[in-house]
Amino acid sequence: MFHKEKSIQLKNSASALYNNLSVLRIAPRRLTYFTVVHANVVNMVSTSWDGLNYSHRQLQSKEPNVATSTSLIMQAAFCALPSRDLLVVSSQKGIQMYESDGSIMVYWHALDTPEAPTAHAVFARGISAVSDNYICVGVSSGAVLVFDIPSKGSNITLSEVLEEHKEAITDIASECSGSQECLANLVTADDGGNMCVWKSGEEFQLLNKIPGLDITCSSVKLWKGTVLAGYGTGQIRLYEAVTGILHAEVNAHARWIYSLDIAPFSGLLLSAAEDSFVRVWHLAITPETNSVEIAHLHNECVTDTQICGAKFCDGDGYAFAVTGYDLSEIIRYVQS
């Protein structure tokens, strides 16, 4: 169903972080941007669709009044809003927002770091664009910061802090950007496997809490009102977002899941884990019962590799890309 394409070389290898790959398709320019985190650097690669041209850029983690920061980056993710695309980088010191090509930093938000050293690490992780003008970023305290993004310029403001989680945020996902009406359009997950389902707006509204089982939910997605969650047990669970009803539970991987992705137009789901496997699944909604069914379609094994990032390169799931710990390349697969 899928075959391997030519890999994209990276300047540095990928760190072992959840969801350590982000992809942005720029259709008017026939380009795709990829980002992968290595320690305190974000590796950016811009590739032309014909595969002939590549350009590389590296972004360092930053902090005020310091020439070179050694603070580790936890995640880099593209956020596509109707009016603009931004690249958001979260680290141990704060949150940086760049124009999507990485050329200009438009905003910096410092994290509150305690004066005295504590047993708890401070970091930001979990990044998602929500609705028309918000970007949400999770932090290690369990809070979710909501930033209001203007259609241009750098007048970005922290508009709200959502404080429902008690453990560090692992991942955030949204659905229905633009004109679509959605009851639930945001889900946040934490280290204890707990998930909160929200409706965005002037004030974000908590719709549901799905309790965890003290097992980390490392990656989460939202599709047609269904929460898709990947866990440290290697399981994938499908919940109805608003009610929390469990539709399906799949023993998908032998080891910790690091990344999930959904191709929204085709209902293809991608899962990737420490067990060196990337799996493609198909989701279908049964109209009579409004329940979601999941079927396994395809496997790829990246031998001896702890996979840490996997993303579809388009909304139909025609191609996907994979990163692995200590691997200095992005491996690509295309439908046969």
Image: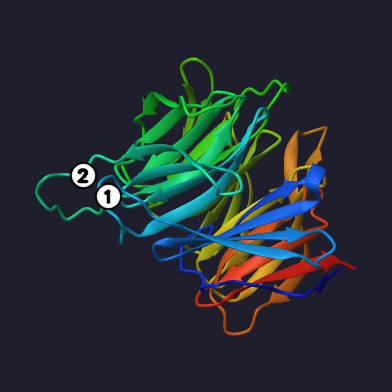
The residue pinned by badge 2 equals 113
Q: Which mark is residue 122?
A: 1
Relative to 64, 157 lies left or right:
right
Labels 1 and 2: the sequence-earlier one: 2
Choose between 36 and 275: the one closer to the eye: 36
Badge 2 crowding class, 10 Å Cα cut-off, few under 14, some 14 to 19, many 20 or more, is: some
Vertically, is 166 above or below 243?
below
Residue at 50%, 52% in the rendered image = 76
Q: How is the image coloured?
A: rainbow
Residue 150: % across, % down:
54, 23
Q: Nearer the viewer, residue 305 or 275?
A: 305
How crowded is the residue under tag 1: few (<14 C-alpha within 10 Å), some, or many (20+)?
Answer: some
Report whether residue 210 is seen.
no
Q: Residue furthest bottom?
A: 304
* Amino acid marked by disc 2: Thr
Residue type, numbered disc 1 = Val
Discs 1, 2 touching: Cβ within 8 Å: yes
Residue 48's quadrant in the figure? bottom right
Secondary structure of the residue carrying tag 1 is loop
Q: Is residue 179 left or right of residue 40?
A: right
Q: Is residue 320 left or right of residue 102?
A: right
Q: Is residue 3 left or right of residue 281?
A: right
Quadrant containing the N terminus is bottom right
Q: Quadrant location of residue 289?
A: top right
Give x and y (percent) for residue 186. 55, 32
Q: Nearer the viewer, residue 5 or 110?
A: 110
**Residue at position x 85%, y 63% in the image:** 50
Q: Residue furthest left?
A: 116
